[in-house]
Image (cartoon, grey):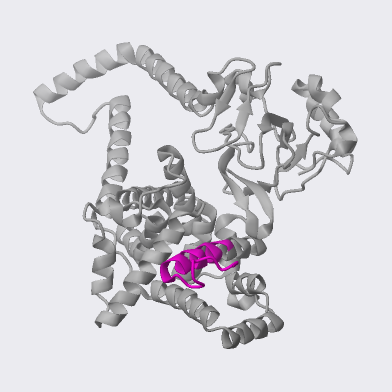
């Protein structure tokens, strides 16, 4: 950021590209929309560019960046009234299951591909039903490998609340898996 | 073994499980093939999802960013050039043209500055009122319904926060308070935007929901500093007034006295509903919330979130 502040645009690009796919992955997961994720990513980087002049490296840069990204994602969701999206991730692709198929196809071996596809579907279905907070906590924890403390910093919550969010998300995922696998007969574990 | 309990343990993060819970889970897995299958499926699903390749954003994102930055930069350059003229321009004809332009711009400069001022004021007005539009366009007693939420925001008929002109927002200072009133029809949701770019009272409604894992109905608000304000609204249906108070702590511990001084500034008429024993100091990091008891109940009924 210091280098960019002195006008080094390449330094900004290097910085952006270091977190490039992490940010995009997270934003895609939260917005549930490919084009939306691109828009929010652009807005996030723009805010980062604007923040360069006043940025002070107090905490982890990644947390700082994801805090901006989350705020932008929330604005986007609010503007689109998409807090409770019903479209699946793949429905934005035009071609039904394009993303899942592409991702699955990149995994070696048919069994692994099937497993991956099932996992993506299950998690996707579970994420679709989650509120933004739980979705963010789950994505940052499992996909970005961030600690609950770091996520708490991004979300402005206590680590305990973050854990509660993730727990809730796991519960939803478990319910989805339960339906998919038809475990416990009718799919109701409480029986 | 209680299956419900096993599922509860399974939903917890592995590092949050106590040794006893981990042992219970293990025993459950050994005792029941179905449960073992479920554990394997959940953990396997998460693991496979974690390992899925990452999506790569297109390079057009950076291109779009630099386009926007350059565009802004160019706009700034143009305005500077217009203001200063173009002293470096060479050539007789050009110089003459610019002299005329300078003369023209010079004559009209006060008009242009005035026009720009009016445009800026309009923009500011639009920006500041736009966020409150859904509420401000409603008349006294009308109900604003947030599009994605279930809770109705009742417009304060006595000339409350939502009806104050935008100019009044600028009079808010740290230590001042604002309030909003809403009805809990059932345990659930709230959607309300309070925005005041001049002050730290920019409470931007973020989301709300039923956090059953925590056993709570929660409302999260994030302010323009990115700070979260989380509170638990009452489950009891009724009409409530929430008061958010700016980030400065009251002098000493005299909360009631401090609130009195806050209300004395511009909301004295609400003092009677703010009996001290109904106040709950949430002490939420930078922002403080106070909640009044639901109307129609006695003040010592609580109303605390």
Q: Residue B19: x, y in percent?
A: 69, 84
Res B161 seen here: yes
Front residue of B285/B76: it is B285
Number of numbered discs: 0
The residue lying at 46 percent from left, 76 percent from top is B41
* Image quadrant assignment for residue B171: top right
- Residue B70 at x, y = what percent? 28, 43
The image position of residue A146, as x and y in percent, is 51, 69
- Judge by depth and name the residue closer to the eye, A106 or B165: A106
* Residue ID at (48%, 68%): A178
**Residue at 42% across, 65% down:** A123
Q: Which residues are magenta?
A: A168-191
On screen, residue B122 versus residue A109, left or right, reads: right
- Looking at the image, residue B240 sits to the left or right of residue A184; the answer is right
Residue A117 is situated, as x and y percent measured from the top left of the image, at 32, 70
What quarter of the picture does the N terminus of chain A occupy? bottom left
- Where is B300 relative to A177, above or below? above
* Residue A170 drawn in magenta: yes
- For residue B122, which quarter of the picture? top left
Decide if residue A144 is in sight here: no
When asked about the image quadrant of residue B89, the answer is top left
Q: Residue at x 54, y 38 (%)?
A: B149
- Locate the C terminus of chain A and report the quarter of the image it occupies: bottom right
Whether residue A181 is in magenta: the answer is yes
């Amino acid at each position: 950021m210091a280098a960019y502040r002195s006008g080094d645009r390449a330094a900004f690009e290097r910085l952006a590209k270091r977190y490039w796919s992490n940010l995009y992955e997270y934003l895609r997961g939260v917005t549930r929309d490919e084009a939306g994720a691109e828009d929010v990513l652009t807005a996030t980087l723009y805010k980062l560019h604007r923040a360069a002049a006043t940025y002070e490296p107090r905490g982890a840069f990644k947390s700082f960046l994801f805090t901006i990204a989350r705020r932008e994602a929330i604005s986007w969701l609010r503007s689109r009234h998409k807090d409770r999206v019903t479209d699946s991730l793949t429905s934005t692709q035009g071609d039904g299951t394009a993303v899942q198929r592409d991702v699955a196809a990149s995994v070696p071996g048919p069994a692994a591909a099937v497993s991956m596809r099932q996992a993506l579907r299950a998690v996707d279905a579970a994420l679709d039903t989650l509120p933004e907070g739980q979705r963010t906590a789950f994505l940052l924890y499992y996909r970005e490998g961030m600690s609950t403390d770091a996520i708490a910093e991004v979300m402005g919550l206590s680590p305990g609340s973050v854990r509660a969010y993730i727990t809730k998300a796991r519960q939803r995922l478990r319910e989805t898996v339960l339906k998919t696998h038809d475990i416990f007969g009718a799919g109701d574990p409480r029986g | 073994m209680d299956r419900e309990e096993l599922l509860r343990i399974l939903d917890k993060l592995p590092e949050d499980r106590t040794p006893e819970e981990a042992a219970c889970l293990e025993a459950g897995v050994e005792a029941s093939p179905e449960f073992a299958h479920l554990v394997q499926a959940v953990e396997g699903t998460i693991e496979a999802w974690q390992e899925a390749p990452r999506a790569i954003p297109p390079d057009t994102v950076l291109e779009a960013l630099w386009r926007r930055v350059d565009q802004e930069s160019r706009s700034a350059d143009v305005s500077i050039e217009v203001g200063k003229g173009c002293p470096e321009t060479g050539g007789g004809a050009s110089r003459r043209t610019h002299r005329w332009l300078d003369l023209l711009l010079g004559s009209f400069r006060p008009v242009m500055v005035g026009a720009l001022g009016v445009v800026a004021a309009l923009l500011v007005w639009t920006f500041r009122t736009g966020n409150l539009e859904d509420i401000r366009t409603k008349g006294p007693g009308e109900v604003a319904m947030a599009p994605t939420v279930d809770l109705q925001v009742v417009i304060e008929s006595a000339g409350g926060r939502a009806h104050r002109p935008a100019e009044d927002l600028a009079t808010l200072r740290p230590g001042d308070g604002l309030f909003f009133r809403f009805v809990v029809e059932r345990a659930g949701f709230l959607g309300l935007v309070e925005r005041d770019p001049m002050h730290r009272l920019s409470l931007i409604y973020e989301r709300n929901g039923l956090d059953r894992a925590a056993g709570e109905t929660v409302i999260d608000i994030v302010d323009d500093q990115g700070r979260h304000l989380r509170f638990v609204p009452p489950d009891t249906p009724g009409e409530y007034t929430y008061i958010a108070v700016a980030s400065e702590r009251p002098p000493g511990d005299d909360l009631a006295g401090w609130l009195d001084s806050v209300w004395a500034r511009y909301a004295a008429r609400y003092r009677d509903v703010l009996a001290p024993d109904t106040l709950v100091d949430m002490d939420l990091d930078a922002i403080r919330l106070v909640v009044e008891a639901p109307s129609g109940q006695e003040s010592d009924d609580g109303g605390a979130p």
